[in-house]
Structure formats: structure tokens, C-alpha cells
């Protein structure tokens, strides 16, 4: 497989593996994705107040009025639960004021059915009144004749319905244990519904069930029952759409109300940030007194309204945590949900398949960009791919109430980006290492270090004048050897010669300038300054000659050829550095010492190593030298005295 195909394969498989991993993680550890879901949901709610959006504050239906039973009410009326005659007086007063509906979300405390209970039930017959599971008796108020079972039967007979218009495979929460009103209230109530304010595992109430299942029967919530009474929709005009919604009013409205629910059958709340400011909120005790004393005056503000009665008491467990960073009374949660249905301002959760699509598409898109674009562009597009879904999701939530959870897709995208960057880094490292390995075959370690220092510089360092020991080596008679050999054989032999030569050259800190046919030019003392460069040069020459002599026995058997070398060494000042243009350059040396070393090598006999006087003066005490007669060298105007390098002197121990 070619590098290009391998790269395409990796960039295709890696994002799919990441997507499948997170998809599996979401399946096996749903609490992980739920944590991301909740964090984003809460963040959006808490950001609403800081952005100018039509959803910053949900609209409030002016038909809703909240009568709160607060601490002041209970202090003045004798504690909570309120005595039943106060509730009876409130019903009669509100009836006189012309309210349309009364929605009870509180507790009646009566040990047994009294005359007041009968009067209250009678009062309920004259106004559309909704009684919920929340209008309930305490556990110890049940008589011994199992009143709870009777109430359950009455509840199921009067207020259940069949909404399974499209099948029974839709998820609907099961009805949990609950206390219900007394039988006399159930017989006379206009409608009834359960109260279930569901909190997530972190204790925050983000959603509630609008319908619960009891065996094979469906029971509406107080929220749904109240909204349908206010809208004058028959209590059984409900359809559960398996695609994720509850539809009410198909027989009444040209455009029925489609209430979105999640895959578990829950309705997500669209909370009002400050309910005391935006809802019509009144204190129960004040309204009780006002409606009894001034019924005609109060009717101007209450006629045609729907009144919710509920507790807002401190030191009770009726308060619930919400995404808007403030606990709300349970009755206000009910009020908010009813308002959501009346104003049709819902939070619609994106379908699961859309989230899965994002989990797979975003990493694949990113991978494709990494495949064809430069790293800088890839990083910019990665940031955009992370930012744009967040911005788009936030905008959809603020303006249309559409919640697109992007936590898991973005986490998949980020992990994919990191892995792709890691793969690309590894690929570049491997590529650079290959280039380095190849380059190291052509240049010395010292020059490699010099190149690494300048790799990030747009301008190469300038040239400098430096004293070096320059070495020329040539293989004697190699040209004639090539005339009777195959090219492959010559190439193989030359490779072995160079390998032998380079090992010794680098061992003595020499720098290879270039190969010249069957010879080479090298120098000692640049680009890195070394001590005793003259001695290192002569030692390298002696070592190379010795290694060639040793290898000749092998080469003679293998190739039928015996190799000998000539060498010239001169020490002097040269100009060293990078020569060339902006696109191409080479590190080399020029100067008189270079020419002198070349002429000494050319005048040397087979197997000889000739050095100039400058080099001889520097090493004479440590090496055996043989002075030669001055000779005229091409390109040099005066006779040159040279010295033959024989061997290095032995050190006395």
C-alpha cells in the first residue's frame, strides 16, 4: 500500500472508530452523555438573561393566576394544611368572581368526610374545577375500609383515556404510588390528573411526564388536564405520536397543539426566570379576604381566569431545583408547564438519529479536511467545526426552543482531532527521520547538527574565514577497473569503499564535503571547531588506508580487484559556509588550502599520504614523517615542500 493510500485509509477509519467508541459509550454508560446533555441544557437556560432573544423570557398567558399559600397565609389561617372551610370559602368566592377554572395543587387534611366536604363537593359542580392527585389526603386519613382502593377505582373510571392511536410501543412513564382525593371529590371534579415533578439524578427538575401509564390505561398529569380544560379540549382528545409528541385538540383546532416529548415520554420545561415578576401571583389569604368583601370589584380582575392554588411554604420539601439556578415551588413548576402548553412555547429535543449523525459526520468531515489541507488551515477549520455547532445550537435554543445536544458530538470531534494530530505528528516525525537517515548518508554528524540548528531559519548563516585541515582522497586506478566490470558490481564495490572510508572519517570528527567520482573532499574543524584538527585529519587518513588494506582480501575474493588510495592533506585558512541561492545551497569550503590538498593528492603515489609543511609542523612530534623534495604543483607559482605521512609514533608507557 502506498503512503497516499495508507494515509487515506487511516483518515477514514480513525473517525469512524472514534464515533463508534463514543456511540458504544453512550449506549453502555448513558449517564455519561446525560451529564453532557444536562450541562449544556442548564448553561443555555442560565445564558438566556444575557442575550436579547425572543426566548429570553417565555410569554405568559394572561388567563393564569396563581394563588399562593405562603408562610403569611398559614400564620394567619392556622397552619398548613389549611382547614377545609377556608378552601370552601375560596371556591365560593372565586365562583362569585366568575373564574373559569380552579386548579388545586395542595393537601386537604381531614380525618373523615365532613359536612364541609359535602358542601365543597357541591360547590365544585357549578364551576369547571380540576382536582389532581395533588389534592390529596394524608396517609393517616384513610379509613379502615380501604378508601384508597375506592379512590383508585374512581380515578381510573372517570379520568383515564386511550391515546394509543398509533400503537402501544411509545414510551410512557409508569404511574408511581400517589395519594388521591377523597371519593366525594373525585365524583364531582370536572377533571383530574397526577402530579409528578420528576428530578434527574442530580436533583434538578428539567422535565415532567404529561401522561403516565397505569396497567394498560393512561392518566393525564395535572398540567395536561388543566391546559385542556382551559383550552376547552375534551379530556380524551389526545394522541400519542410515536415520533415524539403528544397531540391535543385535533377535533377543536385547525392546527392542533403538538407537545414535544423525549424518547422516555417526558416533557421538557421552558422555565420563566422570575415567576414572581412575570406571573400574576397573589397571596391566598389576601385574596380570600378581598373576594369575600368585594366580589364585584374582584370579578373585574378574575372573571374568565384560571386560578391555580398551590403552596409556596418555606421549610417544606415542595421546592425543587431547576436549571435557572434557583429552587422553585412545585406549584410554580406546574404553573410554568401549563403556561408552556397554552403559549405553545416548548423545548423540542433533537431526535436521537440527528445526534448520531453529528457524531459520525463531524469527525469524517474533519478527517477529510486534515487529509487535503495544510496544518494551519486544518486547525482553523477544527476550531470552526467546534464553534459553529455550539453557536448554531445556542441560536436554535434561544430563538426556536430547539435543543440540539452537541456535547457528545463535539467530544467525539475533539478526540478525533487530537488523534489525527497525533497521527500526523507521528507521520511527520517518521518522514523527518527518514529524511534525516537519508541525509546522514551524505553529510557528517557535525554538519547534520549544523543543519538542525538552521532548520527553522529563513536566512542561512553567512560564511566565515576559518583555519581547517583539508583532505582529498582518491581511489587509485579505479577508472580503469570500471571498464571491465558491470555497473552493478562497480556500484556495490564503491558503496563498500565509501562505507569503510566514512566510518573512519566520522570517527575522527571529519566533515564530508562531497564525493568526487571515486574520491572525496573532507575537512576537519568546521562547522564545529575541534581540538588538534591536524592530528585528527592525519589519523583519519592512516585509519582509512589501514581499513582499505584490511578489506582488500575480501574485495579481491568478491570482486577480483585490489583497491589502493592516494591522499593529500593541507592546513590553512579557508572560507567556509553556505553557498548558493535562496532555494538551493550547500555548505562547502573554498580557499588556497583546498587547492593545495587537491594538488598534493594528485602528486601522491599509490598508497601515499602527503601533507603540507603547515600540517607537518603541527604534528611532527607525534607522527613519523618523511620529507620530500620540493616540487612544482599545478596552479601554485612556487615549489612546494611536502611530507609523506608514514605512521603515528607509539606512545611510551
Image (tube, rainbow, N blue to C red):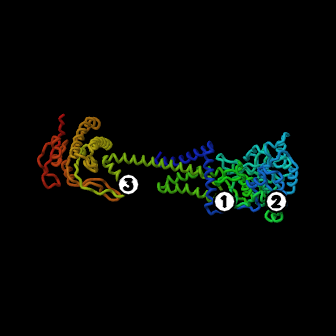
Q: Nearer the viewer, residue 53 or 586?
A: 53
Q: Which residue is mark 1?
A: 400
Q: Which residue is mark 3?
A: 456
Residue 521 in view here: no
Residue 388 position, x and y percent, is 57, 57
Label 1 – label 3 distance at C-alpha:
51 Å
Residue 289 position, x and y percent, is 80, 59
Callout in the foreground (2, 1): 2
Q: Nearer the viewer, residue 519 or 364?
A: 364
Callout in the foreground (2, 3): 2
Q: Which residue is mark 2?
A: 100
Task: State the mark number for residue 289.
Answer: none
Residue 314 position, x and y percent, is 70, 51
Label 2 – label 1 distance at C-alpha:
31 Å
Residue 413 in view here: yes
Helix or strand or loop: what does disc 3 sit on? loop
Extreme-left residue of the structure: 629
Q: Are marks 2 and 3 in contact (CB under 8 Å)?
A: no
Q: Is residue 622 above or below residue 570?
A: above
Marks 2 and 1, the one that precedes in the sequence: 2
Marks 2 and 3, the one that precedes in the sequence: 2
Amino acid at each position: 500500500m502506498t503512503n497516499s493510500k495508507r494515509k487515506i485509509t487511516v483518515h477514514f477509519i480513525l473517525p469512524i472508530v472514534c464515533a463508534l467508541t463514543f456511540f458504544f459509550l453512550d449506549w453502555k454508560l448513558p449517564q455519561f452523555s446525560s451529564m453532557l446533555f444536562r450541562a449544556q441544557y442548564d448553561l443555555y437556560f442560565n445564558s438566556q438573561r444575557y442575550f436579547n432573544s425572543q426566548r429570553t423570557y417565555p410569554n405568559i398567558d394572561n388567563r393564569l393566576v396563581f394563588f399562593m399559600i405562603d408562610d403569611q397565609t398559614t400564620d394567619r389561617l392556622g397552619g398548613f394544611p389549611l382547614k377545609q372551610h377556608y378552601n370552601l370559602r375560596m371556591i365560593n368566592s372565586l365562583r362569585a368572581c366568575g373564574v373559569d377554572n380552579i386548579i388545586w395543587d395542595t393537601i386537604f387534611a381531614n380525618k373523615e368526610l365532613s359536612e364541609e366536604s359535602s358542601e365543597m363537593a357541591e360547590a365544585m359542580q357549578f364551576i369547571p374545577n380540576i382536582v389532581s392527585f395533588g389534592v390529596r389526603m394524608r396517609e393517616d386519613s384513610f379509613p379502615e375500609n380501604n378508601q384508597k382502593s375506592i379512590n383508585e377505582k374512581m380515578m381510573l373510571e372517570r379520568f383515564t383515556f386511550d391515546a394509543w392511536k398509533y400503537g402501544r410501543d411509545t414510551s410512557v412513564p409508569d404511574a408511581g404510588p400517589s395519594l388521591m382525593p377523597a371519593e366525594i371529590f373525585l365524583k364531582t371534579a370536572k377533571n383530574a390528573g397526577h402530579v409528578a415533578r420528576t428530578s434527574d439524578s442530580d436533583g434538578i427538575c428539567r422535565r415532567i411526564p404529561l401522561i403516565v401509564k397505569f396497567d394498560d390505561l393512561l392518566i393525564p398529569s395535572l398540567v395536561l388536564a388543566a391546559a385542556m380544560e382551559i383550552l376547552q379540549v375534551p379530556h380524551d382528545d389526545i394522541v400519542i405520536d410515536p415520533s415524539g409528541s403528544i397531540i391535543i385538540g385535533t377535533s377543536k383546532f385547525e392546527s392542533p397543539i403538538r407537545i414535544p416529548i423525549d424518547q422516555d415520554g417526558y416533557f421538557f420545561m421552558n422555565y420563566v426566570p422570575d415567576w414572581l415578576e412575570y406571573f400574576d401571583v397573589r397571596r391566598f389569604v389576601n385574596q380570600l379576604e378581598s373576594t369575600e368583601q368585594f366580589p364585584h370589584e374582584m370579578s373585574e380582575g378574575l372573571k374568565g381566569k384560571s386560578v391555580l392554588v398551590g403552596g409556596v411554604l418555606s421549610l417544606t420539601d415542595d421546592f425543587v431545583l431547576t436549571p435557572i439556578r434557583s429552587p422553585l415551588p412545585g406549584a410554580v413548576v406546574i404553573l410554568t408547564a401549563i403556561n408552556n402548553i397554552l403559549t405553545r412555547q416548548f423545548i423540542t429535543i433533537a431526535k436521537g438519529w440527528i445526534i448520531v449523525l453529528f457524531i459520525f459526520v463531524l469527525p469524517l468531515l474533519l478527517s477529510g479536511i486534515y487529509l487535503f489541507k495544510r496544518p494551519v488551515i486544518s486547525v482553523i477549520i477544527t476550531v470552526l467545526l467546534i464553534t459553529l455547532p455550539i453557536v448554531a445550537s445556542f441560536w436554535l435554543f434561544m430563538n426556536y426552543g430547539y435543543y440540539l445536544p452537541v456535547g457528545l458530538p463535539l467530544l467525539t470531534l475533539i478526540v478525533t482531532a487530537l488523534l489525527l494530530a497525533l497521527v500526523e505528528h507521528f507521520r511527520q516525525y517518521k518522514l523527518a527521520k527518514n529524511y534525516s537517515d537519508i541525509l546522514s548518508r551524505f553529510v557528517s554528524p557535525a554538519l547534520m547538527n549544523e543543519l538542525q540548528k538552521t532548520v527553522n531559519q529563513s536566512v542561512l548563516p553567512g560564511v566565515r574565514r576559518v583555519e581547517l585541515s583539508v583532505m582529498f582522497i582518491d581511489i587509485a586506478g579505479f577508472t580503469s577497473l570500471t571498464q571491465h566490470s558491470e555497473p552493478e558490481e562497480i556500484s556495490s564495490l564503491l558503496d563498500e569503499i565509501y562505507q569503510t572510508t566514512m566510518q573512519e572519517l566520522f570517527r575522527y570528527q571529519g566533515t564530508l564535503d562531497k564525493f568526487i567520482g571515486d574520491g572525496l573532499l573532507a575537512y576537519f574543524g568546521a562547522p564545529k571547531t575541534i581540538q588538534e584538527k591536524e592530528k585528527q585529519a592525519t589519523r583519519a587518513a592512516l585509519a582509512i588506508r589501514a581499513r582499505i588494506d584490511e578489506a582488500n582480501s575480501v574485495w579481491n575474493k568478491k570482486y577480483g580487484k585490489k583497491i589502493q588510495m592516494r591522499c593529500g592533506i593541507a592546513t590553512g585558512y579557508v572560507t567556509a559556509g553556505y553557498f548558493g541561492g535562496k532555494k538551493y545551497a550547500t555548505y562547502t569550503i573554498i580557499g588556497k588550502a583546498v587547492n593545495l590538498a587537491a594538488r598534493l593528492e594528485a602528486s601522491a603515489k599509490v598508497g601515499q599520504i602527503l601533507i603540507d609543511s603547515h600540517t607537518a609542523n603541527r604534528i611532527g612530534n607525534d607522527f613519523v614523517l618523511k620529507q620530500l623534495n620540493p616540487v612544482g604543483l599545478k596552479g601554485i607559482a612556487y615549489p612546494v615542500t611536502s611530507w609523506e605521512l608514514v605512521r603515528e609514533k607509539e606512545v611510551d608507557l
